[in-house]
Image (tube, rainbow, N blue to C red):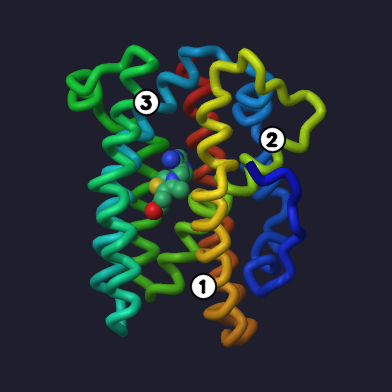
Amino acid sequence: MARTTEPMSGAFARLIEANATDWQAYTQHRFVRELAEGTLPEAAFRHYLRQDYLFLIQFARVWGLAVYKSRTLAEIRQGLDSLKAIVEVELGLHVGYCAQWGIDEAALEDLSESRATLAYTRYVLDAGMSGDLVDLHVALAPCIIGYGEIARWILQQPFTVLEGNPYADWIAMYAGDEYQALVASELQWLDERLSALDAARMAALSNVFRDATRLEADFWQMGLDLA
Ligand SMILES: Cc1ncc(C[n+]2csc(CCO)c2C)c(N)n1
């Protein structure tokens, strides 16, 4: 597991700096702290897991949109690989993980989307539809890069308890090398694209990043509120 955090220094880091308060409210949310301590009510986590299943289905559509918004074969492949990863691997893992928490597949099929799930997923889809591939990736950054940072942050906190923590598997998955490598490659993709943009374009993207970050924080809050 990754135990150190290299401070980000590329163009993407400027989006975080410009939205530091929202970013911290998301990445250090009470849900995240209680997950780290192992004190999060299990009902909150179960609710989060159920809605996350619906979230992942919408994110498969987001990667389908990324394929459509691509300009090069390399970009199409990248979108397709992510789409296949969600549909063929991540959703299956999620269903298996939910089963460990006593949530069976039939219960997942029966769910309706909460307002927080609707707002966040449709926001990302709209950012991609009304913008270009960079808008789409910036809207995805709180999800992909945020979860990586959250897992690394958790491992550094003095209040974090991994032994006997019912959420230890969840933390280990996002702190693990495989997921952290995905975060690093997304960060590199964004740094390359963002470094070529002017201030006005960066300001517009900063708003997309801020909105998506707030909607991620609302997703945590949804878990706490319905517990
Ligand atoms: C609310 C919420 N936000 C982020 C993730 C993490 N996540 C979801 S899909 C994906 C990969 C994108 O291709 C990642 C990293 C989550 N599970 N739930």
Q: Amino acid at mark 3?
A: Tyr
What SS does tag 1 mark? helix
Which is more toward the observer, 160 or 129?
Answer: 160
* Residue 213 in view, yes or no: no
Q: Residue at x 37, y 38 (%)?
A: 117
For label 2, the residue is: 154
Quarter of the image where ligand 1 sits = top left
Whether pointer 3 and pointer 2 mark residues with C-beta atoms closer than 8 Å, the reply is: no
**Badge 3 or badge 1: first in the primary sequence:** 3
Report the quarter where the N terminus lies.
Answer: top right
Describe the element under mark 3 as helix, strand or loop.
helix
Q: Relative to 95, is 107 above or below? A: above
How many labels were placed on the picture? 3
Q: Is residue 57 above or below residue 124?
A: above
Q: Going by the image, does 71 lie left or right of 219?
A: left
Disc 1 C-beta below 8 A from ligand 1? no
- Along the horizontal axis of the image, is 182 left or right of 64? right
Label 3, on which residue? 97
Mark 3 vs mark 1: in front: 3
- Pointer 1 with pointer 2, Cβ within 8 A: no
10 above or below 212?
Answer: below
Instruction: Kindly report the distance in space between the C-alpha atoms of the residues bearing marks 1 and 2.
Output: 25 Å
Q: Which residue is located at x 59 percent, y 42 percent?
A: 175
Give the numbered dot on residue 74: none
- Graded by Cα atoms within 10 Å as few (under 14), some (14 to 19) or many (20 or more), the crowding at tag 2 reads many
Residue 195, position as x, y percentages in the image: 61, 82
Q: Which residue is mark 1?
A: 189
Give the x, y percent position of residue 80. 26, 64
Q: What distance separates the C-alpha of mark 3 from that of mark 1? A: 30 Å
Note whether residue 164 is visible.
yes
Sequence order check: which comes first, mark 1 or mark 2? 2
